[in-house]
Amino acid sequence: MSSFDENDAFEGASLSARAMAALRPEADYLNELNPAQREAVELLDGPILMLAGAGTGKTKALTTRIAHLLNTGRARPNEILAVTFTNKAAREMKERVGRLLGQPAEGMPWLGTFHSICVKLLRRHAELAGLKSNFTILDTDDQLRLLKQLVQAANIDDKRWPARMLAGIIDDWKNRALTPDKVPTADAGAYNNKGVELYAQYQTRLRELNAVDFGDLLLHMVTIFQTHPDVLEQYQRWFRYILVDEYQDTNIAQYLWLRLLAGGHKNICCVGDDDQSIYGWRGAEVGNILRFEKDFPGAHVVRLEQNYRSTPHILAAASNVIRGNESRLGKELWTDKPGGEKVRLIGHWDGEEEARWIGEEIDAMQGGTRGVRPMNLDEIAILVRASHQMRAFEDRFLTIGLPYKVIGGPRFYERMEIRDAMAYFRLVVSPEDDLAFERIVNTPKRGLGDKAQQTIQRTAREHGVSLVQGARIAVEQGLIKGKGGAALRELVEGLARWNAMTRGPRIEIEDDAVIDDGSAPVRYGPPEVSHIELAQIVLDESGYTAHWQNDKTPEAPGRLENLKELVNQLDNFENLQGFLEHVSLVMDNEQDSGGPKVSIMTLHAAKGLEFPAVFLPGWEDGLFPSQRSMDETGLKGLEEERRLAYVGITRAEEVCTISFAANRRVFGQWQNAMPSRFIDELPEDHVEVLTPPGLYGGGQMSAGIETRAAQANVYNSPGWKRMQARQGQYGMSQPRESRNTVIDATALASFTLGERVFHQKFGYGGVVGIEGDKVEVEFDKAGTKKVVAQYLSAKDDVPF
Ligand code: ATP
Ligand code: MG
């Protein structure tokens, strides 16, 4: 956070006379606009709302408006307040303004995100919030530590009422611009009736520490503006023009902040699309955009209907999907672009195959053998619903050497929770891994602060042993007292226990195996617990899973999903060690060539962006629309998911490919997935259902996509065929023998393909075929056998 350019943005930031003289003739950039956009650019005074669908040129008009304000001398660069949603969008906007003006847009200190702008403002007025101007900005960890102290001091059982829950509640209040004294009585029961009181204490404590959290940045500024009219007036005068992109995703605090600042001159231009409101889960209020005309009477409303981004097929697909939402204004878009390709739809056997296929498609697109023209990697994006989906693509692309970048977040193996989990695995496999130990010794928090960690380090050094050993000695000698000491003992014992589980019982060596020097080699039998189960045990018993389960921040569920995905992936390896080696190899493989790369990002991060070719994988019910968001907010959640689908499709300019898999692995177990209900909402005339190449000569399949018939295509996928070949029972001649056959048979035997099972005699294995009451199982150790179902138990039923 300290990297913000906090130079005094009000001084010396005007365009020089020379620069003014070099500006572009305005006709140039105005001519690039249609009449409605032009209106939005040229009507410089008074409130303007541009409410229009995706790709209609809202951002373009907004950017041109900034250029026009500068070019006509209406405002100096530092008198323009321009807010966008991400730092990336802010950078792009600055570049676009520069291009329009024909020179870099310098000195625009107030073009940025809400947070970056508010930090600057709050530094100038810190004292009005009871802070010093050098206040620190707490990250979520610090924030939580602080809350925990308060919760403990209040004698609240933080097992029942986790501090993370309180953190979530406070964030929510801050998003709604509610200081402790303003929390409505309806919320008084929050956090076991103690929420408001603790919130007040928390704010006091922050002040004492001269610190703020993220939510405070806006909250403090709103409060200052509300309570110090003189300060507000100063900024109302200073920010002569206000522009806001993606207005549909502002929360209440941001909305109030804008309304206060624009309250004087009302030169505010907001642009957005109610159909693209996708941050409801973080407090965004689509109502903000719908009430604009009420807030700013006489506002000029500009509607744009021509889409300049996508082909007619892509646009039709997006429009048809979003039509399923009831709560929307309803806008029709049109384009005069030529036909282009239909939206492509394809089903796969599983997620790995989906990744493999997309990798091949991208290669083919690059080579010009697929799609309308040869594409550069920079022109291609993969947009996923959940970040854990990225893992399959990253692994695949690393393997085939396809350059990629992850936008808006770290790559899978670089994520905090993945690194933490891997550190545990590393320690289990090799207890000498001191770096891994340092990473997890106090993660989750075990009350082992700097002092305790120094004691461990010192003990290890003195005895010339690893940190784990040092920790064990420190525990035995009682060098670390209290809760921390007890927790450390638990960790050390856990590590020893888990390490022992990587192998089976010791095998006594017969005499003739004794080596000359008298030392018998130590041999162990096969482990009794699979490495997948072990991984799960380690994450659970170490308290790491619970650490995120108790976390009530919006990121926590995603982190838990990433951890699941990590465990899933272990299925592809023989043991933990093999997996760890794989990761270090793939991570080592990639070097930044600086050349073009495929972009991988979440749908949320893709807002406002556009790419000639877009892949939208994982369109399966439960994944997309996400089960969690439907469970939490019902129809509202489903509609937000549908808007995400709309955002996704409308990122594509020329080629849009939607895919789904019939199976996903969850915790190493297969689960059937139904194609997303959004697939049913795609208009058939604009969609081409693909068959993976290599099958039946490739090309098109005639399947209609109504009533989920698209899923039939799964039975043509290589994975399905592989399965059939192995089962040898459904016969290749009936590729469309539908999954129902399997489901019926499964009902008989009550097992599913891919399921992990246990047999008294043969041990663990995975189901590869089902025939009546017989189940074919590929046993881990005993090979493939057909066994009678009643002698099998589902893995979960097996007592440990
Ligand atoms: P989103 O809702 O996805 O943010 P948007 O409404 O902001 O979309 P822009 O990104 O501004 O749309 O524009 C979409 C594309 O159309 C861009 O490539 C832009 O350059 C182009 N475009 C916009 N207006 C025009 C125009 N009048 N003539 C030609 N191209 C245009
Ligand atoms: Mg835009």
Image (cartoon, rainbow, N blue to C red):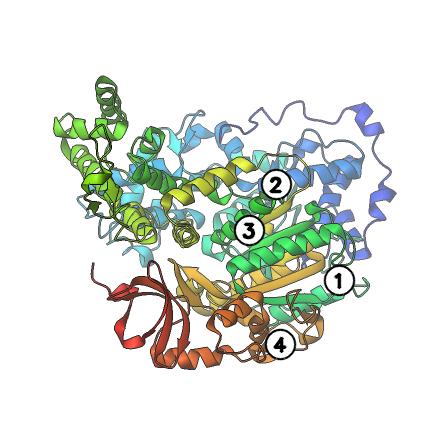
Nearer to us in this view, 389 or 767: 767
Q: Which residue is mark 4?
A: 705
Judge depth for marks 1 and 3 and give the one in front.
3
Looking at the image, is mark 2 or mark 3 earlier in the sequence? 2
Element assignment for label 2: helix
Q: On the picture, is 221 further left or further right than 331?
A: left
**Mark 2 sits on what residue?**
88
Can I make out residue 38 in this image? yes
Q: Nearer the viewer, residue 456 or 26?
A: 456
* Left or right, residue 151 beside residue 696: left
Please name which of the two marks, 1 or 2, marks the residue nearer to the observer. Answer: 1
Residue under the point 19% across and 47% down = 156
Check the image and name the residue furthest to the front.
512
Say few, some or many: other residues with alpha carbon within 10 Å of mark 3 (under 14 / 14 to 19 / 20 or more): many
Give the alpha-carbon distance from disc 1 to disc 4, as whole Å: 21 Å
Q: Earlier in the sequence, mark 4 or mark 2?
A: 2
State which tag comes first along the sequence, 1 or 4: 1
Residue type, numbered disc 1: Thr
